[in-house]
Amino acid sequence: NRIPFQLHAAGSDDLSPAQTHQLMRESFQVWDDVATARVRFIDQGETATRIPAQNDGRNLVYFDESGNHLRAPRGSGVIAVTRINSHSFTGAISDADIIFNGRDFRFASGSEGWRDNGNLINLKDVAIHEIGHLLGLEHTPLDGPPETRPTMNPFNRGDGPGEGHSLEPDDIAGISSLYPTTGYQISVGSISGQVVDLDEEPLFGTHIKAENLDT
């Protein structure tokens, strides 16, 4: 599972291209470092000409400063989107572009002045979340305090810069299930079966949450 990505050369208007690209590469490395997942990224460098396209087979990271590509309504609160193209039968992902909303939000590299009426966002916090989508993970229903809340929780709470820099057990379990290393699946428990409604009709997209009743 060697997954290529390419960075748009301009980066973010709020940071230098070098800063932007360094933070993005660090964000990919967070997922690459999961010991129980066979995720390895191929850095294809930077491009000055390529734009987001769902059928070009390129996984592009792009900062949309005008809103022309993201096409999110103003005030929607959408910080970034990962647009995925996948095979309708196998689910295999053929293209995944990460597009950051540079029109409505400003991005920072660290903790200095990280909040400005909610519009200044720590870039790495959001990037790690979006790369999870690129890998095929959806949002998790699990919540909790900042230090234990999964990175794939759908909301940016503004807890502070760096709260989304690490993966939590739910994130690690998800990516390890999709890209398991040899022996991973037999080392953990599993849940199987079908969820149905009161009429015994199967339900699609149901979230199953396992809890340790002792803790």
Image: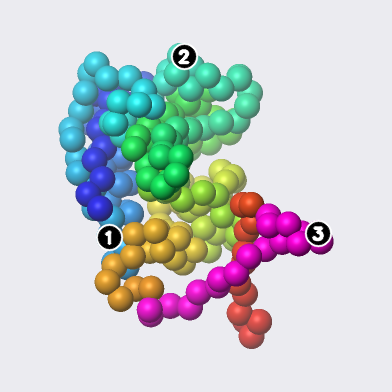
- Image quarter of residue 187: bottom left
The residues bearing labels 3 and 2 have C-alpha atoms spaced at a distance of: 45 Å
Residue flagged by tag 2: what amino acid is it? Asn
Judged from this view, the residue extending furthest toward the bottom is: 214
Residue flagged by tag 3: what amino acid is it? Asp
Q: Is residue 92 above or below residue 60?
A: below
* Residue, disc 1: 38
Give percent across and percent down for residue 8: 28, 25
* Residue, disc 3: 199
Total numbered labels: 3
Q: Of residues 55 and 75, which is closer to you in this image?
A: 55
Q: Is residue 38 above or below residue 139?
A: below
Q: Quadrant location of the C terminus?
A: bottom right
* Residue, disc 2: 68
User: Magenta segment: does it hold 193?
Assistant: yes
User: Magenta segment: does it hold 192?
Assistant: yes
The residues bearing labels 2 and 1 have C-alpha atoms spaced at a distance of: 35 Å
Q: Residue at x 46, y 40 (%)?
A: 88
